[in-house]
Image: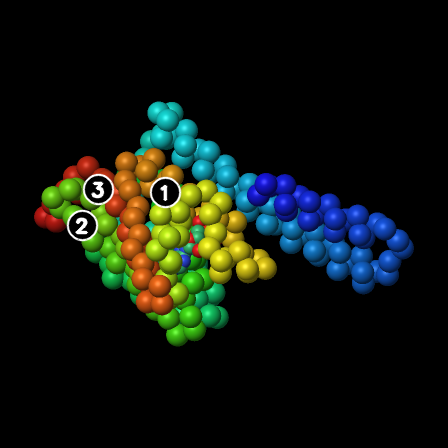
């Protein structure tokens, strides 16, 4: 269904355009619309491919050789990428880093995890909101703990168990014209679990949400002095 809808929209845009002779302006507007439809479709396909790859790893397929990544650096990259959009919505982004926490992961995958959580936190925050990314080290469990907290709209208790489901979208997302497709959190969960970690959420409607990602520390990272 999720793939069929954008393809059907694109088809009807083209059919409408070909239905009768049109002015250059109308053709241009129609092509612009088609381009936007194609970009959404491209984004959706990329997300589904990521998800399929994470599923294959979880099912035991070999992962590529992974180098230790600085969590703070990759969070900074994701924050920098989203800052212009956050500024335009008047949402502040804060990072509380732990300078040398490292995990074994693909750098792109890490950025996707933080970016998806940040995008939601910004999207579901009101004007003047603050999103805080906090990095910690749980020495006992040898885990890096990264939380992304917003003081936004929050999630209804009956939606909370479903937010990580593929294609689940809350009312606010469904009503958005250019809304997401409900794959962001499913991708976060699949990637985090493929790396042997987990992701959880707490939320209070009207007060905000906190998503917490736990990933195994890279070897040699188990104590602060090492
Ligand atoms: P979407 O593309 O709809 O953002 P996601 O998988 O990223 O899909 O999120 C699923 C749903 O979870 C969203 O539609 C929204 O209802 C809810 N959600 C996710 N993150 C937040 C958040 N930080 N605050 C409030 N609701 C959220």
Asked if the residue at tag 2 contacts the one at tag 3, i.e. Cβ–Cβ closer than 8 Å, the answer is yes
The residue lying at 32 percent from left, 38 percent from top is 193
* Cβ of mark 3 under 8 A from ligand 1: no
Observer able to see residue 19: yes
* Front-most of residues 151 and 224: 151
Label 1 environment density (alpha carbons within 10 Å; few <14, some 14–19, many ≥20): many
Residue 28 x %, y %: 77, 58
Residue in the foreground of this view, choosing between 121 and 161: 161
The image quadrant of residue 25 is bottom right
Position in image of residue 47 (x %, y %): 49, 42
Q: As displayed, is residue 61 above or below residue 171?
A: above
Say whether disc 1 or disc 2 marks the residue closer to the N-terminus.
2
Q: CA distance from mark 3 to mark 2?
A: 8 Å
Residue 97 picture quarter: bottom left
For marks 1 and 3 on the same chain, the one whose residue lies earlier in the sequence = 1
Classify 10 Å Cα crowding around label 2: few (below 14), some (14-19), many (20 and above): many
Q: Tell me if 10 is positioned left or right of 141 in this view.
A: right
- Residue carrying label 1: 189
Classify 205 as above or below 57. Answer: below
The residue to which callout 2 is attached is 137
- Display colour scheme: rainbow
Q: CA distance from mark 1 to mark 3?
A: 18 Å
- Does 128 sit above or below residue 119? below
Q: Can residue 108 be seen at all in this image of the molecule?
A: no
Residue under pointer 3: 217
Q: Quadrant of the N terminus?
A: top right
- Residue under the image location 37 percent in, 71 percent down: 129
For the residue carrying disc 3, how many other residues have a C-alpha within 10 Å: few (<14), some (14-19), or many (20+)? many
Seen from this angle, which residue lies furthest bottom? 128
Identify the residue shown where x is 10% and y is 48%. Answer: 225
Q: Nearer the viewer, residue 132 or 208?
A: 208
Marks 1/2: CA distance? 20 Å
């Amino acid at each position: 269904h999720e793939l069929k809808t954008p393809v059907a929209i694109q088809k009807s845009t083209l059919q409408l355009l070909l239905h009768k002779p049109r002015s250059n302006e109308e053709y241009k507007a129609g092509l612009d619309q088609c381009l936007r439809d194609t970009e959404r479709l491209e984004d959706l396909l990329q997300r589904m491919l990521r998800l399929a790859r994470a599923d294959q790893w979880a099912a035991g397929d070999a992962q590529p050789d992974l180098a230790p990544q600085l969590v703070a650096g990759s969070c900074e990259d994701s924050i920098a990428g989203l800052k212009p959009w956050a500024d335009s919505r008047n949402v502040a982004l804060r990072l509380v880093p732990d300078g040398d926490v490292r995990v074994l992961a693909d750098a792109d995958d890490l950025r996707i995890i933080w970016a998806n959580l940040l995008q939601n936190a910004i999207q579901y925050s009101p004007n003047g909101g603050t999103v805080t990314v906090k990095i910690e080290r749980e020495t006992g469990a040898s885990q890096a703990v990264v939380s992304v907290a917003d003081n936004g709209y929050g999630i209804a208790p009956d939606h909370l168990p479903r937010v990580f489901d593929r294609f689940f979208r809350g009312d606010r997302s469904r009503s958005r014209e250019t809304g997401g497709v409900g794959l962001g959190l499913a991708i976060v969960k699949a990637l985090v679990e493929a790396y042997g970690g987990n992701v959880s959420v707490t939320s209070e409607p009207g007060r905000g949400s906190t998503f917490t990602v736990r990933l195994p520390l890279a070897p040699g990272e188990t104590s602060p002095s090492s």
